[in-house]
Amino acid sequence: MVLPDKSQKQKKVLVITSSYPAGLNDLRGTFIGKQVHSMVNLGYNMIVLTPHVPSAHLLEEYENVKIYRFPYFFPFPLEQLSSPGGMFFGFKQSFLGKVQIIPYLIMMIISSGIIIKKENIEIIHTHWIIPQGIAGAFWSIITGIPHISTAHVLDLTISDNIPMLRGVIRCILKRTDVVTVNSSFTLHQVTRFSPKSLPVKVIPMGIDETRISGIKNNNVHLKAGHSILFVGRLIDWKGIDILIQALSIVSKKIPDVTLTIIGEGPKREEYEALTHHLKVKDIVHFKGKVSDEDLNLAYRRSDLFILPSNEKKGIVMEGLGVVLLEAISYGIPIIGSNTGGIPDIIEDNVTGYLTIPGDPDDLAEKITYAFENPEKSRECVIRAREKMRKNFSWDYLGIKFAQVYDGILNAIQTNEDISKRII
């Protein structure tokens, strides 16, 4: 692999994202935080612009990253588009969220312009083509600063329900220098909109190398228990209702099975009510937001990790499923829905088990199989860890992003075609 150009290391990059952690134990946009810090480790000066959340300051610095949070509604506690459920959920679920979209866009564009001038930004990197790409493309036109946009699938598939966004996406991509995508599925989606001349690279979100090397493959010993873990936002398309239904089926055959759910979101009360309705409330434990120490302990105590992501009205929502990588790093067998970018991580019966999205019976069958075939599950974990080490470590992925950054800057300096620099 060609290493990034050392002479470019102090370049200032503005990352514009709809989601970014608002504290140590906040699950919002954790994978964006990891990407940003991987670039800091390579010497880049990373500056983040993200929407304000009520619990955070408008300007803060954390681990050598300056974080600007733009306000978009007053009073702050009524801000809906930066809720734990995510921007798209906040927009969809409430009238107030729909009202806030215009001030959100205006404040995002104004704030990014102010930061670009104040911080002497040299690269604009937007996460999510819609809506962050709007600000990136706009200021790239005005200032000539190169614009990179990373697609995470929902920012593309949402146009299947809102056709007017297709033209917006095409317009943004015409004013974007390079697009990166988080999975092969997202690559397929972006080619529906992008000009043929636009460089598109698959660079997934990843996991820290220290996590991967924490457990040696030949020391993966599965426990004899039946503890299932889910970590993520409690929103409809994560499929937690499907998981609870599957658990009620599995519990009839495996009485000591339990499920721990870590994370917060607007669907929590609904899911708690479902556990009462299905009479599994005593074996389902909602932990909410937890500390890193408690999250680490939960992983180590678990025997199986499940990401049961669903499709909503035919729209694929899960771009990759980074949380599966976290589970693999702890040596835990994984089950994930066969949707979006999840198959990039899980090869069925090779690195884990794939289940039919939205099908609790199929999920229950896969859970039972994983528990009843511990040696097969152990082999899956070993293969998954090797695949993760090769393809998903931030040490590796950070260099891939650095090559994009440096390729663009070098092309501009030498008046070359950017597409020839981005291999």
Image (cartoon, rainbow, N blue to C red):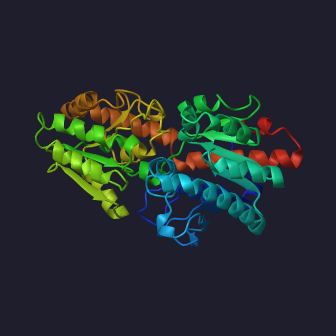
- In the rendered image, residue 53, in percent from the top left (x then y), is placed at 50, 65
- In the rendered image, residue 225, in percent from the top left (x then y), is placed at 17, 44
Quadrant where the C terminus sits is: top right
- In the rendered image, residue 81, in percent from the top left (x then y), is placed at 52, 56
Q: Quadrant of residue 163?
A: top right
Q: Is residue 418 left or right of residue 101?
A: right
The reply to whether residue 299 is visible in this rendering is no
The reply to whether residue 34 is visible in this rendering is yes
User: Toward the viewer: 22 or 46?
Assistant: 22
Q: Is residue 351 left or right of residue 188?
A: left
User: Toward the viewer: 64 or 108?
Assistant: 108
Q: How many marks?
A: 0
**Residue sitting at x 18%, y 31%:** 372
Q: Quadrant of residue 404?
A: top right
**Residue sitting at x 33%, y 57%:** 296
Q: Quadrant of residue 139?
A: bottom right
**Residue sitting at x 49%, y 61%:** 21
State whether residue 352 is above or below residue 176. Answer: above
Q: Residue furthest right?
A: 415
- In the rendered image, residue 72, in percent from the top left (x then y), is placed at 59, 63
State whether residue 363 is above or below residue 93. Answer: above
Quadrant where the N terminus sits is: top right
State whether residue 343 is above or below residue 276. Answer: above
Q: Is residue 418 left or right of residue 263?
A: right
